[in-house]
């Protein structure tokens, strides 16, 4: 009975939090340095600390000065967008279809926080990077075991997963939900794969079973010194090998962010990744006309969602020469299976800002 009451209270608490974020969100003005060291860019940011930290770290190399304006009612935010009181080059708003409707931003870019990945089994190394990973794993004599032992799962969580995530998110926030891990790993077909070097377990990954596509849920490493030995690469390689032997035809490496230059996305891409829609919540990007925002878009290609389909967006300067050969290079560099199109946009200074070029399908 107490469990049911607690569940209802948590549900109501989450509903209240979501409504609060929609009705009266947090607002910041960000003064950021572009990656190419041009003039600073000013951004009106509406949302949460956690996603803001990721956005700044990914697109501006963590070089921003923040001015917190407090919580503002959504009609006040709408006014800021319409008159651009703070003379911002761009607005970034966290949200779903609700925020897109409220701020009338349906024609702006919507970048989902996360996209889902899938890979064919057995994994095949098709490029130099993935082949190099396989050579590393063999060179260092890495082996693996698979277990359901609760003590080994606890050890993995506290000594591999948690320290690695804390290092990766040192400037942001992250929820370590041990109870969720404990409950999930008690279910049938959920297992822990541990990678071993000599007599030491150096890395691991929690695998969530499924009748269709099993998922590599959470991974970790005991010490970053083992990274160059192929410790994390081995979790993907051996999980693929193990699940292929069990008869699975596909595997998911979990979620990836939607910026095409994101390190984890690029790392997983080398195993011939296919993407599909996952997150309904994301960044709404509203650009204004300026040289600074032009540089931002050119340096930060991304995946965006429109009518529940995923598209790639790459930006070029309209005034620069752009050949078919350049077009093919962009395709090779940025296209990922699962995108309906990879659209190349020319940036122009006239009203409208962006002009669409020929897509890849």
Image (cartoon, rainbow, N blue to C red):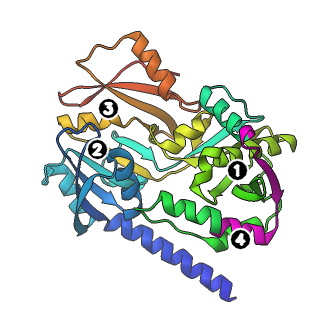
Asked if labels 2 and 3 touch by Cβ distance under 8 angstroms, the answer is no
Position of residue 309 in the picture relative to residue 285 (left or right): right
Residue 289 visible in the current orientation: no
Which residue is labeled 1 in the image? Answer: 215
Distance of label 4 from label 1 (alpha carbons): 19 Å
Which residue is labeled 4 in the image? Answer: 154
Disc with the residue nearer the chain's start (1 vs 3): 1
Disc with the residue nearer the chain's start (1 vs 2): 1
Distance of label 3 from label 2 (alpha carbons): 15 Å
Counting from the top left corner in percent of width and height, residue 268 is at 59, 40
Counting from the top left corner in percent of width and height, residue 267 is at 56, 39
Q: Which of 8 and 151 is in front in this view?
A: 151
| Figure quadrant of residue 325 | top left
Disc with the residue nearer the chain's start (2 vs 4): 4
Q: What element carries label 2?
A: strand
Mark 1 or 2: in front is 1
Give the crowd class for mark 4: few <14, some 14-19, many >=20 residues within 10 Å: some
Give the crowd class for mark 1: few <14, some 14-19, many >=20 residues within 10 Å: many
Residue at 19 percent across and 45 percent down: it is 40
Disc with the residue nearer the chain's start (3 vs 2): 2
Q: Which of 46 and 236 is in front in this view?
A: 236
Residue 322 visible in the current orientation: yes
Q: Nearer the viewer, residue 69 or 206?
A: 206
Question: Which portion, as a residue range, is magenta?
Answer: 138-158
Q: Which residue appears farthest toward the top when viewing the image?
A: 324
Q: What element carries label 4?
A: helix
Q: Is mark 1 on a helix, strand or loop?
A: strand
| Figure quadrant of residue 69 | bottom left
Q: Which disc number belongs to residue 286?
A: 2
Residue at 37 percent across and 40 percent down: it is 109
Which residue is labeled 3 in the image? Answer: 298
């Amino acid at each position: 009975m107490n469990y049911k009451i607690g569940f209802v209270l948590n549900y109501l608490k989450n509903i209240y939090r979501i409504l609060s974020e929609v009705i009266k969100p947090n607002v910041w003005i960000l003064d950021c340095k572009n990656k190419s060291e041009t003039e600073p860019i000013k951004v009106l940011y509406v949302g949460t600390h956690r996603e803001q930290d990721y956005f700044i770290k990914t697109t501006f190399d963590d070089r921003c000065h923040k001015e917190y304006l407090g919580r503002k009612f959504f009609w006040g935010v709408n006014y800021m967008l319409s008159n651009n009181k703070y003379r911002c080059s761009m607005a970034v708003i966290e949200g779903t279809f609700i925020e897109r409707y409220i701020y009338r931003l349906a024609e702006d870019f919507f970048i989902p926080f996360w996209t889902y990945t899938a890979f064919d089994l057995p994994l095949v190394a098709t490029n130099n990077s993935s082949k190099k990973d396989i050579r590393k794993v063999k060179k260092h004599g890495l082996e693996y075991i698979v277990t359901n032992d609760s003590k080994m799962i606890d050890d993995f969580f506290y000594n591999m997963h948690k320290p690695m995530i804390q290092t990766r998110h040192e400037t942001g926030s992250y929820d370590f939900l041990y109870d969720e891990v404990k409950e999930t790993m008690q279910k049938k077909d959920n297992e822990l794969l541990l990678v071993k070097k000599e007599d030491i377990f150096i890395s691991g990954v929690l695998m969530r079973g499924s009748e269709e596509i099993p998922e590599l849920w959470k991974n970790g490493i005991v010490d970053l010194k083992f990274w160059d030995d192929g410790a994390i690469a081995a979790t993907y390689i051996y999980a693929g090998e193990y699940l292929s032997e069990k008869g699975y035809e596909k595997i998911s490496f979990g979620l990836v962010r939607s910026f095409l230059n994101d390190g984890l996305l690029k790392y997983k891409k080398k195993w011939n990744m296919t993407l599909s829609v996952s997150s309904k919540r994301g960044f709404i990007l509203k650009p204004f006309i300026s040289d600074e925002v032009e540089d931002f878009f050119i340096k930060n290609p991304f995946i965006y969602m429109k009518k529940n389909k995923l598209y790639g967006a790459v930006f070029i300067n309209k005034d620069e020469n752009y050949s078919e050969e350049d077009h093919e290079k962009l395709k090779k560099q940025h296209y990922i299976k699962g995108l309906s199109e990879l659209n190349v946009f020319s940036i122009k200074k006239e009203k409208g800002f962006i002009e669409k070029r020929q897509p890849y399908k």
